[in-house]
Image: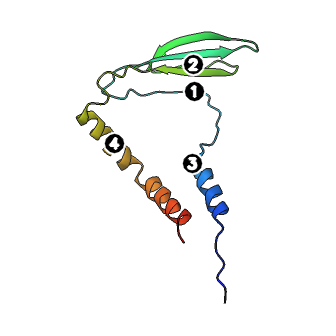
Amino acid sequence: MQQKRIPRILISVLFFLLVVPIFASAQNVSFSTLGQLGDEDILIYEYNGTAQTLYGMWNTSSAYIPLPANDFNIVVRPSAQGRFTPALFLADGFAYIESNAIPIVILIFLIGLLFKK
């Protein structure tokens, strides 16, 4: 009796669907500071049909950032001072792994299924 096998293309499609973010519409936006970097500048450019114009400039410490009614782009200007010192890099890496442990395990499982013989 022959076993039915899941085709690799199906696993690839499922993997792609889990990785690709879903597009969303926002009414308001909030940002948080990353701690060691300090406050960062947030620039919002409004698209008026032919060109982009600066709608406003805020900081990540702002309590509220109003959004334009039309299409817009958000630009965050980070200041990467001391970001990759060994202590901060390890702290950031462990914090990321701790907060995303379940998706990381699922991702490793799906990758394992792709290479299963």
* In this rendering, the label closer to the viewer, 1 or 4: 4
| Earlier-in-chain disc, 4 versus 2 | 2
The answer to whether 42 appears left or right of 88 in the picture is right
* In this rendering, the label closer to the viewer, 3 or 1: 3
| Earlier-in-chain disc, 1 versus 4 | 1
Alpha-carbon span between mark 3 and mark 1: 25 Å
Location of residue 4 with respect to 91 vertically, above or below? below
Alpha-carbon span between mark 4 and mark 3: 19 Å
Callout 4 secondary element: helix
| Earlier-in-chain disc, 4 versus 3 | 3
Question: What residue sits right under mark 4 in the picture?
Answer: 93
Q: What residue type is labelled 3?
A: Val
Which picture quadrant has residue 105?
bottom left
Camera-nearest residue between 86 and 105: 86
Callout 2 secondary element: loop
Q: What residue type is labelled 2?
A: Pro
Where residue 55 sits: x, y (%)?
60, 11
| Earlier-in-chain disc, 3 versus 1 | 3
Question: What residue sits right under mark 3 in the picture?
Answer: 19
Camera-nearest residue between 13 and 64: 13
Callout 3 secondary element: helix
Callout 1 secondary element: loop
- Disc 2 + disc 1, Cβ < 8 Å: yes
Location of residue 25 with respect to 111 vertically, above or below? above
Q: Outermost residue, left direction?
A: 87
